[in-house]
């Protein structure tokens, strides 16, 4: 018995010493974090998807938050992730196209980045070209029209600072910074960016005073196949993500300069398809569509009501194309807009946990 | 002495096991199964490669393409010759664009016996069709609106057909609970039972859906009359149910 106990102690010590790399901090102990899941998500959704090789820790999240706002990631030290994902805009860019460090301008609007832990499809960007949040975060640093850096240079710059090596030690047990660890930390932070406490959420949870009659009627239009028919792609009272996280051609153009998903898959049947964005926080996320072509929600609603354009790959859920769409009357349009805005959450944009720590 | 007893017992058990394996009727073997969902158009197999590409002609003569096909199968029950019923899954959302969704209950082991009957529900029966109950179906945008009776879709078949002017038009052949009037609903699921089967060894159960039947029998479906906005159309929902009675078949191999 005594022998077994001694062996156990020795084995434990051996395992502990094995887990400590030479360059690691001797105090490498992380604090696990459980996401605070909104009640409406608890009620309706599967648990969040957290990769087993990147568990959430206080140290990792704090590092990721710092990196999210870190301009040293860019080629000339002038741009961070947060430069195009602004807190006051629910972490999108109010500019139609973001401007990179060289002055180059992209051709898509920056995407919302909340509730990503429930993106079970796990494909990112408007065209789905990145797998996993960690995979997504690899892209902008080297994109010549965004941060225009190289990963070796970005990593070397962080390594040369007086602060980051220690923070990586605390988060990952090594002071040797790699691009993989940078993106793991950013992904951890992004998984904490949860928005699930809008007035509409309160309504679904039983607060019947949370919505106006106009907003409730707007929801009925949203759920009516013969009017809005928004729910087949954009969530419902059963899907509080307000997106299906997959790709559709929603009838914007008859031909495409930007073929979206088709460029990724190589399948012409995917041309013109882009990811459905969440409808949460629309009050802050203008302009709308993958290319930010619509400045207002009125323009968006008008598009689906009377602006649909036929193309070969248009989703069959886009109906009455000859007349441009559902032809909503003005009262219904106003109510639909009112409902959509009830999905916004002022507290999300001002959440102190998501602000610049630097 | 104890050791000898153990050896003798082991030996006897081995003989018993070998003799079990040699039974002519295999009645002592567990029965491992899986369920495959396949689709066809009057016998011609339909796969993901047909989505958006292959032109089918329905009974009414309209040429159509299918771009999306999802449907729900639940409550698969297998009966043995003594009438015992074994339910092998809760529900399965089949998506033609995802091969993994077309195989389920893989590795399910049934007790030894001869099985001669299988039943399943297309969609959910009333007891299981519970509003917002299933998280995976919620994120799959599979819910059926409350004003139409709530619960979940049974099928979503989207595509395009060519109208008399030669123009492509969309169709949304969506099926679920039928709304009779405000607050009054009619169950619309289909229970399929096949009882002329006989298997007692590991098998693949194939549930076949003949998509042509949705447009054929007893109602010849005219897409020019009914193509979109069908979820709240009581007549359309009931016609789908009637045609759905002839859509499914089961084989076991």
Image (cartoon, grey):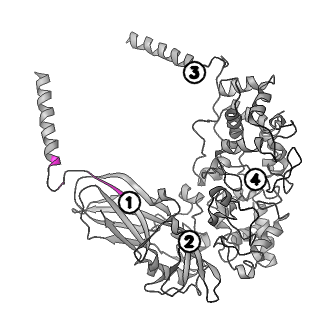
In the picture of the structure, the residue carrying the numbered disc 2 is: B53
How far across and how far down the image is residue B71, in percent? 50, 67
Q: Could you tell me which chain the residue with mark 3 belongs to? A: A
How far across and how far down the image is residue A346, in percent? 81, 51
In the picture of the structure, the residue carrying the numbered disc 4 is: A111
Considering the numbered disc 1 on the image, is that residue within a helix, a strand or a loop? strand
Considering the numbered disc 3 on the image, is that residue within a helix, a strand or a loop? loop
Whether callout 3 and callout 4 share a subunit is answered yes
Q: How far is mark 4 from mark 1, CA to CA? A: 40 Å
**Viewer-closest of A55 and B235:** A55
Quick one: label 3 or label 4, which is nearer the N terminus?
A: 3
Q: Label 1 near label 4: C-beta < 8 Å? A: no
**Residue A190 location, quadrant:** top right
Q: Could you tell me which chain the residue with mark 4 belongs to? A: A
Quick one: label 1 or label 2, which is nearer the N terminus?
A: 1
Q: Range of the magenta residues?
A: B20-34
Label at residue B35: 1
Label at residue A19: 3
Q: Please determine whether, in this image, residue A167 is positioned above or below residue A279.
A: above
Considering the numbered disc 2 on the image, is that residue within a helix, a strand or a loop? loop
| Residue A307 in view (yes/no) | yes
Residue A300 appears left or right of A315: right
Of the 4 image quadrants, the one containing the N terminus of chain B is top left
């Amino acid at each position: 018995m005594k022998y077994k106990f001694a062996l156990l102690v020795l084995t434990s010590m051996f395992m502990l010493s094995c887990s400590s790399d030479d360059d690691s901090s001797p105090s490498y102990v992380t604090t696990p974090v459980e996401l605070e899941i909104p009640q409406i998500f608890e009620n309706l959704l599967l648990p969040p998807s957290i990769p087993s090789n990147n568990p959430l820790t206080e140290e990792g999240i704090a590092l990721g938050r710092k990196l999210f706002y870190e301009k040293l990631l860019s080629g000339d030290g002038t741009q961070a992730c947060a430069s195009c994902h602004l807190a006051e805009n629910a972490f999108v860019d109010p500019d139609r196209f973001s401007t990179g460090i060289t002055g180059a301008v992209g051709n898509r609007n920056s995407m919302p980045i909340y509730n990503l832990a429930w993106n079970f499809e796990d494909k990112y960007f408007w065209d789905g070209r990145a797998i996993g949040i960690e995979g997504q975060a690899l892209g902008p640093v080297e994109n010549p029209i965004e941060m225009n850096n190289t990963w070796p240079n970005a990593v070397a710059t962080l390594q040369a600072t007086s602060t980051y090596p220690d923070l990586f030690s605390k988060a990952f047990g090594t002071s040797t910074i790699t691009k993989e660890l940078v993106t793991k930390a950013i992904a951890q932070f992004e998984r904490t960016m949860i928005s699930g406490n809008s007035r509409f959420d309160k309504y679904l949870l039983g607060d019947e005073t949370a919505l106006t009659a106009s907003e409730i009627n707007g929801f009925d239009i949203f759920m009516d196949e013969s009017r809005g028919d928004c729910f087949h792609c954009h969530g419902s009272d059963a899907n509080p993500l307000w997106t299906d996280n997959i790709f559709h051609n929603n009838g914007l153009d008859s031909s495409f300069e930007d073929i979206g998903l088709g460029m990724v898959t190589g399948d012409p049947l995917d041309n013109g398809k882009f990811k459905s964005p969440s409808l949460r926080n629309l009050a802050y996320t203008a302009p709308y569509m993958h290319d930010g072509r619509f400045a207002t929600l009125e323009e968006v609603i008008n598009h689906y009501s009377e602006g649909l354009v036929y193309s070969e790959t248009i989703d069959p859920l886009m109906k009455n194309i000859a007349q441009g769409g559902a032809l909503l009357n003005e009262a219904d349009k106003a109510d639909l807009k009112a409902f959509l805005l009830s999905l916004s959450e002022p507290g999300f944009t001002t959440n102190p946990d998501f602000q610049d720590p630097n | 002495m104890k050791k000898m007893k153990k050896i003798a017992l082991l030996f006897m058990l081995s003989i018993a096991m070998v003799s079990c394996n040699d039974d002519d009727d295999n009645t002592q073997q567990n029965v491992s199964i899986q369920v495959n969902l396949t689709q066809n158009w009057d016998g011609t197999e339909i796969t993901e490669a047909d989505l958006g590409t292959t032109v089918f002609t329905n009974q009414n003569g309209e040429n159509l393409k299918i771009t999306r096909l999802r449907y729900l199968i639940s409550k698969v029950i297998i009966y043995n010759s003594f009438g015992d019923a074994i339910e092998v899954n809760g529900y399965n959302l089949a998506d033609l664009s995802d091969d993994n969704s077309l195989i389920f209950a893989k590795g399910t082991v049934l007790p030894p016996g001869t099985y001669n009957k299988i039943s399943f529900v297309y969609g959910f029966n009333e007891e299981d069709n519970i509003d917002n109950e299933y998280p995976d179906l919620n994120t799959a945008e599979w819910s059926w609106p409350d004003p139409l009776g709530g619960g979940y879709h049974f099928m979503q078949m989207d595509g395009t057909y060519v109208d008399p002017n030669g123009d492509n038009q969309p169709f949304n052949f969506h099926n679920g609970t039928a709304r009779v009037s405000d607050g009054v609903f009619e169950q619309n699921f289909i229970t399929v039972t096949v009882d002329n089967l006989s298997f007692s060894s590991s098998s693949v159960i194939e549930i076949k859906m003949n998509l042509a039947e949705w447009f054929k029998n007893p109602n010849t479906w005219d897409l020019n009359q009914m193509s979109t906005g069908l979820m709240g159309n009581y007549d359309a929902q009931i016609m789908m149910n009637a045609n759905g009675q002839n859509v499914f078949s089961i084989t076991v191999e």
